[in-house]
Amino acid sequence: MKLKYALVALMVSASLLGCATSKDNSVNVKLEAARNNTGQIGNVTLSDWGKETGLSFFISGAPSGSTLPLRLYSFINKGSCEQPGPVAFAMNDRVNTERQAVRGWMFSRSAPVALPVLLSGGYYVVVRSAPDSGNADIFCGDIKPGGSAQ
């Protein structure tokens, strides 16, 4: 059983750090926890799927009082975390998450926009709790303009 947890931890670490040296056209975006979710960490990997972008999220937690099973909404907005703008892409056809043995949650989404468009600047990612858990933004991460798919 301990081997299973070690393998899961290795897989999560590889997904969080491995893309820095990967050749599969992906970019990591660090997610900053909102005030109501202080102390939590998050990351999303954006992957080039041609005319779409795949997003793989890992977060360490959600605010206390969040209803289980944890349901999260995700958006790509115009602007930045510091200067929020309107929603550009809502990725909420599925809102369920998967609990991880390494004390965190994983979920994936896709957006109907090519990765180079997102890397051209002016977009950020938002993770929001479900309406029954406060409907609050809990993570935010700027997609760096001019970033390159690695």
Image (spheres, grey):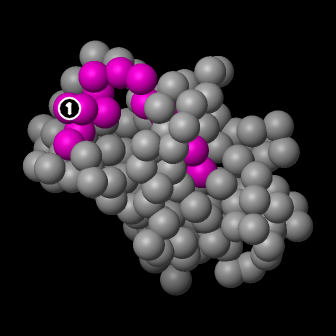
Residue 14 at what x, y percent from top left? 35, 49
Residue 32 visible in the picture: yes
Query: What residue is rendered at 46% in x and 56% in y?
Result: 90
| Residue closest to the eye, 14 or 74 | 74
- Classify 126 as above or below 109: above
Badge 1 local density, few (<14 within 10 Å), some, or many (20+)?
A: some
**Residue occupying image coordinates x 75% and y 68%:** 131
The percent position of residue 145, horizontal first and vertical second, equals 35, 18
- The residue labelled by disc 1 is 116
For residue 100: magenta?
no
Range shown magenta: 114-127
Task: Please name the residue shown 49% across and 38% down the image.
Answer: 77
Q: Is residue 13 visible?
A: no
Residue 77 or 54: which is nearer the viewer? 77
Residue 119 belongs to magenta span: yes
Q: Position of residue 115 (x, y in %)?
A: 23, 39
